[in-house]
Image (spheres, rainbow, N blue to C red):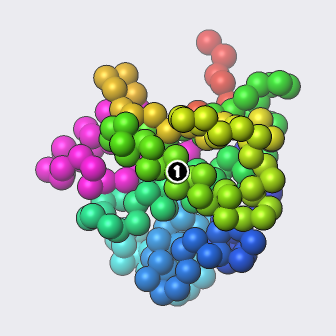
């Protein structure tokens, strides 16, 4: 997977995600997304990152797992939707997908209601951009298919979903499920390993 547009550029571009997370209140969230995408932070951003994570520096490679603890109305859905849109629409996956194979940018939600809210947010982000809206080939109740061969899906958790990982980690910290925000950005688009 190779970004066509960096997360930093997409968050500041008014034709992409610029209007989605504007202003100072979204600054820490933007810093986390830039770091999660594996991009270098400037000194000011690194200080915010250090305060939020207690880590001295950003990972400098796309994170395989990000767990962020938020309260209600903290921006979890918006951050997750922006990251999903970036991975699905602004990254090239030809190096990990066979010709004709569809990639799935999957979000596992708490329940069906949260799945609907999250997919609607992804749809809203894509449709708010003149550039990204042109990539939408089809929208169904639980997926958005893009013309680049990537499908944005949001599914409610069940006993075999990846959400169990999130809930397990949240229980370790004695935090109620639904207050966390987890994503595994390379989970469904990672190269297959031979056995």
**Number of numbered discs on residues:** 1
Quarter of the image for residue 153 reads top right
In the picture, measured across the screen, residue 85 lies left or right of residue 179, that is: right
Query: Which of the two residues, 145 or 44, is positioned nearer the viewer here?
Result: 145
Q: Is residue 84 visible?
A: yes
Query: Which of the two residues, 61 or 170, is positioned nearer the viewer here?
Result: 170
Helix, strand or loop for disc 1: helix
What stretch of residues is rendered in magenta?
162-187
Tell me the residue at 27%/64% (across/down): 72
The residue positioned farthest toward the left in the image shown: 174
**Mark 1 burial class by Cα count in 10 Å: few <14, some 14-19, many 20+:** some
Residue 192 forms part of the magenta stretch: no
Counting from the top left corner in percent of width and height, residue 65 is at 46, 47
Query: Which of the two residues, 29 or 137, is positioned nearer the viewer here?
Result: 137
In the picture, measured across the screen, residue 173 lies left or right of residue 169, that is: left
Judge whether 166 appears above or below 44 on screen. Answer: above
Tell me the residue at 66%/16% (across/down): 194
- Which quadrant holds the N terminus? top right
Judge whether 73 appears above or below 99 on screen. Answer: below
Q: Which residue in the protein does label 1 denote? A: 120
Counting from the top left corner in percent of width and height, residue 84 is at 58, 50
Q: Is residue 58 visible?
A: no
In the picture, measured across the screen, residue 50 lies left or right of residue 22, that is: left
Residue 166 forms part of the magenta stretch: yes
Tell me the residue at 75%/56% (across/down): 133
Judge whether 68 appears above or below 152 on screen. Answer: below
The residue positioned farthest toward the right in the image shown: 99
Counting from the top left corner in percent of width and height, residue 195 is at 62, 12
Counting from the top left corner in percent of width and height, residue 61 is at 61, 56
């Amino acid at each position: 997977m190779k970004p066509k547009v960096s997360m930093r550029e997409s968050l500041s571009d008014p034709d992409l995600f610029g209007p989605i997370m504007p202003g100072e209140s979204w600054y820490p969230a933007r810093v986390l997304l830039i770091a999660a995408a594996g991009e270098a932070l400037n000194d000011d951003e690194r200080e915010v990152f250090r305060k939020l994570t207690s880590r001295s520096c950003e990972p400098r490679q796309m994170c395989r797992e990000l767990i962020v603890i938020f309260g209600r109305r903290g921006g979890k859905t918006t951050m997750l939707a922006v990251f999903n849109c970036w991975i699905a629409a602004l990254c090239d996956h030809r190096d990990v997908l066979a010709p004709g194979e569809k990639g799935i940018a999957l979000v596992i939600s708490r329940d069906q209601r949260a799945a609907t809210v999250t997919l609607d947010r992804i749809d809203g982000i894509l449709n708010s951009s003149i550039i990204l809206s042109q990539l939408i080939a089809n929208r169904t109740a639980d997926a958005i298919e893009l013309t680049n061969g990537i499908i944005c899906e949001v599914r409610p958790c069940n006993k075999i979903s990846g959400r169990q990982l999130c809930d397990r980690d949240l229980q370790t910290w004695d935090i109620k499920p639904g207050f966390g925000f987890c994503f595994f950005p390379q989970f469904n688009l990672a190269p297959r390993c031979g056995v």
